[in-house]
């Protein structure tokens, strides 16, 4: 498993488990102030887990998919799309690409953006769907 994914899981799971434990513990405490403080700490921990999950999830998923398609060295659109999931696609001009903005398209070529909640993957294709180059904007 990718080290980035393991780190992501640790960053999400640790606050999640701690938050649940604190909330369960707060219910059993006798002193009112201890219940409130423990409950607030548990809630804050759960919010931190949610922030990491929703804020970093797309980036980690993009890295995970990259660990699958990069070693496969895709040569065509269908080769690449067999390794991708969860992405939306649209054709863009190179000027909209973060890393490929200086790429000059040859006649018939097009740049397609595969996007997963802010983690774009920009790919230049020939007219017969062969890959010219790939720009991973989330690097």
Image: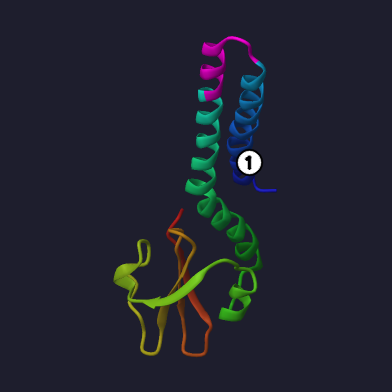
Name the element at disc 1: helix
User: Which residue, as the protein is rendered here, is positioned at the far top?
Assistant: 31
In which quarter of the view is residue 138 placed?
bottom left
Query: Going 51% across and 17% down the picture, which residue do you hit?
Result: 37
Q: Which residues are magenta?
A: 29-39
Q: Residue at x 47, y 89 (%)?
A: 127
Q: Quadrant of residue 9?
A: top right
Left or right: residue 18 versus residue 124 is: right
Residue 87 visible in the shown view: yes
Q: Which residue is mark 1?
A: 9
Residue neighbourhood size for the residue with mark 1, other residues' Cα within 10 Å, grouped as few (<14), some (14–19), many (≥20): some
**For residue 18: magenta?**
no
Residue 111 in the image, given as x and y percentages of width and height: 41, 77
Q: Quadrant of residue 62?
A: bottom right
Q: How is the image coloured?
A: rainbow
Q: Position of residue 47 (x, y in %)?
A: 50, 36
């Amino acid at each position: 498993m990718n080290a980035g994914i393991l780190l992501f899981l640790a960053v999400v799971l640790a606050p999640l488990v701690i938050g649940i434990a604190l909330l369960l513990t707060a219910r059993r405490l006798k002193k009112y102030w201890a219940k409130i403080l423990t409950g607030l700490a548990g809630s804050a921990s759960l919010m931190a887990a949610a922030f990491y999950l929703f804020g970093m999830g797309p980036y980690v998923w993009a890295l995970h998919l990259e660990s699958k398609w990069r070693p496969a060295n895709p040569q065509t659109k269908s080769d690449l799309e067999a390794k991708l999931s969860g992405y939306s696609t649209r054709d863009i001009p190179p000027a909209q690409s973060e890393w490929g903005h200086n790429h000059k398209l040859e006649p018939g070529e097009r740049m397609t953006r595969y996007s997963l909640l802010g983690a774009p993957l920009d790919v230049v294709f020939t007219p017969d769907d062969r890959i010219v180059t790939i720009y991973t904007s989330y690097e």
